[in-house]
Amino acid sequence: MKKGLWFFAVTGILALVLTIVRSSGSTSSGVLYVYCYGDYYDPAIVEEFQKETGIQVIQDTYDTAEELYPIIENNPSRYDVVCTSDYMIGKMEDNDMLAPLDKDKIPNLKNMDPVYMKKAEEYDPGNTYSVPHACGTAGIMYDPTRAKGVDFSSWNALWDPKLKNEIVMPDSLRDDYMIALSRRGYDINTEDPTQLKEATADLIEQKPLVYKYANDSARDLVADGSAIVGVVWNGEYKYIKDLNKNAEFSVPEEGTEFFIDAWVVPKEAKNKANAMKWINFLCRGDIAYKNFEYLYYTIPNTAAYKKMSPEIRNNEAIFPTEETLERCHSLRTLSHDGDALYSSEWKKVKGD
């Protein structure tokens, strides 16, 4: 080989080697497959995480926890970290689908609010498999200037004839039965046929007062004055309040539904170490605060609290007191027979 050709050949080989080394070195730490409810964290944090760690984040979203379950069941190694609801996490635990967290790799767990970590133990004893992402309570959002004389400290308000055609109820079987069962002092997860039939009768009795059964649009109907009252999650409080200064939020004295959506790692995940980095990143105070400002749901992170104004931090609609949380309960997965019973009763409510 001529000297000039030899020089260029060696130079080319060295360049190729350097490219391979760089591509497999510290500038890239692999990938992370994330599965989460849609629009459930600030998109900007993904870019920040990738920049800090060199880990490429590949995201998929879903709408309901029931949609998620068969995806993980049928392809357990498809995702590395998943955010889903408390009752579904309990079901996945029962079916040995989750990997225990490596807490030594999540030092920012120290920032998690112990009140909510204790609440999470209702479905995840010892906080073994999950770290809360966002929490919420269901309650009554109402305009007191248009609903004079109605006491919204109780679910009974939703049966007050003065509110005829002014109430927005959830278009959701479990949420509507939660309201009717709580009103009577029953367990919101009961499978007792007598109690469910009583709740069905109450919901049928209420129907003439209902303006609409709605989920996501409920907040808009209260915000723009189309309805005086709506059952919403507390994460909708600020949105509604910004548009309707008169609106107020009440957690009824009988109790209500409380949820925790949390991050878990599937047992067969391929990139568990990266999953721990992601969870640790989300537990960091500045990142948790960014997610709070994006969502306005309860973000259970004490480091994030320090970045909030006293007006926000002390707002009980956004951050319920411990006393309020004591009368809040989470939905649980029903048995096969219980599910069939609820569905049968719900048809009576929704029927013409």
Image: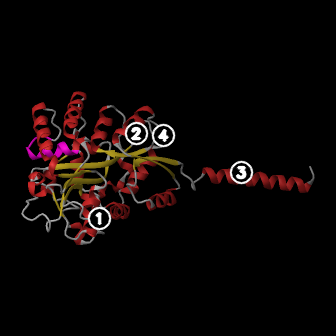
* In this rendering, position of residue 153 left or right of residue 330: left
Q: Nearer the viewer, residue 220 or 3?
A: 220
Q: Quadrant of residue 223?
A: bottom left
For the residues labelled 4 and 1, the Cα–Cα distance comes to 39 Å
In front of the other: label 1 or label 2?
Answer: 1
Tell me which residue sits at (21%, 56%) in the image: 230
Amino acid on which disc 1 is placed: Tyr
In front of the other: label 3 or label 1?
Answer: 1
Q: How many numbered discs, if any?
A: 4
Colour approach in the figure: secondary structure
Query: To which residue does mark 3 refer?
Result: 17
Q: Quadrant of residue 285?
A: bottom left
> Over which residues does the magenta segment extend?
175-187
Nearer-N-terminus badge (3/1): 3
x and y percentages locating residue 184 in the rendered image? 8, 44
x and y percentages locating residue 289 in the rendered image? 34, 64
For the residues labelled 2 and 4, the Cα–Cα distance comes to 9 Å
Nearer-N-terminus badge (3/4): 3
Query: To which residue does mark 2 refer?
Result: 266
Confirm whether the magenta stretch covers residue 180: yes
Confirm whether the magenta stretch covers residue 184: yes
Query: To which residue does mark 1 refer?
Result: 239
Amino acid on which disc 2 is placed: Pro
Tell me which residue sits at (17%, 44%) in the image: 178
For the residues labelled 3 and 2, the Cα–Cα distance comes to 36 Å
